[in-house]
């Protein structure tokens, strides 16, 4: 079995905004692409173009219709990957030490050379965040793109997880959640960020920002206002000249 570190120097993780995610799956595709071409064993697919395709993904997006106590139903897109838990059961059940949590940043990884594909870590994970790659025979999971975030050969703006870099809606944020002054920690505090299934006692590092009631937002925003408000009280420039010229015609501007 593998021991967990008592403390980690940092708690690197993701903050996912469920209010902003549009379910486009860009994060899923970019994750699959990056992790197939770079870190570790490629993520395989089986019968990809057949009638019963399957494959290995480190990040997935699920969609649910949610009915609030008040107001209209909402479609919530729910991205899910490894949450890099502080008390990670997937680490402590691993019989070979292949699954481990790093002291320097708290990232949970799999040493694929030591993985025997027994599946104990997947069974112990309450979030279903691990997948056995059928071609490689080893367990795969989100690495927080550890090969990107410390890669000095990449431009600084690219030293973040691929899913975060790709998200067109800005729904994914990355940083040190162990630092209360970090941008991600401030975001969690401001928006009431939540743990996923806190009753499991795993203390996930990743946080979710809850969706805001759409009816409340709609009451504060008039989406037609920019189109109805006059641009100027009196036309100026070319339009002002044109308006005066039309007024001089018989019958005026009408």
Image: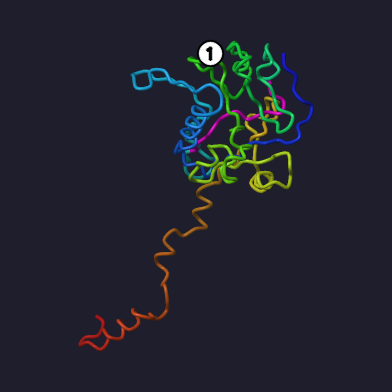
Find residue 104 and report its image quarter: top right
The answer to whether 203 is drawn above or below residue 237 in the figure is above
Pinpoint residue 35: horizontal percent, then vertical percent. 52, 29
**Residue that extends furthest to the front in the rendered view of this protein:** 153
Q: Is residue 85 visible?
A: yes
Pinpoint residue 82: horizontal percent, then vertical percent. 60, 28
**Residue that extends furthest to the right in the rendered view of this protein:** 6
Q: Residues within 10 Å of mark 1 (few under 14, many from 20)?
A: some
Left or right: 147, with 238 as reference point: right
Question: Which residues are drawn in magenta?
Answer: 76-89
- The residue lying at 49 percent from left, 28 percent from top is 37
Q: Nearer the viewer, residue 169 or 224?
A: 169
Left or right: 60, with 247 as reference point: right
Q: Is residue 69 visible?
A: no
Helix, strand or loop status at disc 1: loop
Which quadrant is the N terminus positioned in?
top right
**Residue that extends furthest to the left in the rendered view of this protein:** 250
Reading the image, the residue beneath label 1 is 137
For residue 100: magenta? no
For residue 78: magenta? yes
Find residue 180 and report its image quarter: top right
- The residue lying at 64 percent from left, 36 percent from top is 13
Q: Nearer the viewer, residue 27 or 124?
A: 27
The answer to whether 153 is drawn above or below residue 201 in the figure is below
Specify the color scheme. rainbow
Pinpoint residue 108: horizontal percent, then vertical percent. 66, 26
Left or right: 1, with 243 as reference point: right
Which quadrant is the C terminus positioned in?
bottom left
Pinpoint residue 212: horizontal percent, then vertical percent. 56, 46
Q: Nearer the viewer, residue 131 or 75?
A: 131
The answer to whether 83 is drawn above or below residue 172 in the figure is above
- The residue lying at 73 percent from left, 36 percent from top is 10
């Amino acid at each position: 079995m593998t021991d967990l570190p008592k403390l980690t120097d940092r708690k690197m993780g993701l903050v996912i905004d469920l209010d902003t995610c549009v379910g486009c799956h860009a994060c899923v595709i970019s994750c699959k692409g990056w992790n197939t071409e770079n870190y570790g064993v490629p993520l395989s697919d089986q019968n990809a173009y057949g009638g019963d395709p399957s494959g290995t993904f480190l990040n997935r997006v699920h969609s649910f219709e949610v009915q609030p106590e008040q107001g209209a139903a909402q479609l919530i897109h729910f991205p899910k990957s490894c949450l890099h838990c502080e008390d990670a059961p997937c680490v402590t059940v691993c019989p070979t030490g292949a699954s481990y949590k790093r002291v320097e940043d708290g990232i949970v990884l799999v040493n694929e050379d030591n993985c025997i594909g027994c599946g104990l870590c997947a069974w112990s994970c309450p979030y279903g965040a691990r997948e056995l790659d059928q071609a490689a025979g080893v367990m795969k999971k989100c690495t927080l793109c550890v090969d990107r975030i410390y890669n000095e050969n990449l431009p600084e703006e690219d030293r973040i997880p691929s899913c975060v870099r790709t998200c067109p809606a800005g729904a994914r944020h990355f940083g040190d959640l162990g630092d209360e002054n970090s941008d991600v920690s401030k975001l969690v505090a401001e928006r009431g960020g939540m743990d996923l299934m806190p009753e499991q006692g795993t203390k996930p590092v990743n946080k979710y920002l809850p969706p805001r009631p759409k009816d409340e937002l709609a009451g504060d925003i008039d989406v037609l206002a920019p189109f109805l408000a006059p641009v100027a009280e009196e036309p100026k420039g070319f339009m002002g000249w044109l308006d005066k010229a039309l007024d001089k015609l018989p019958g005026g501007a009408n």
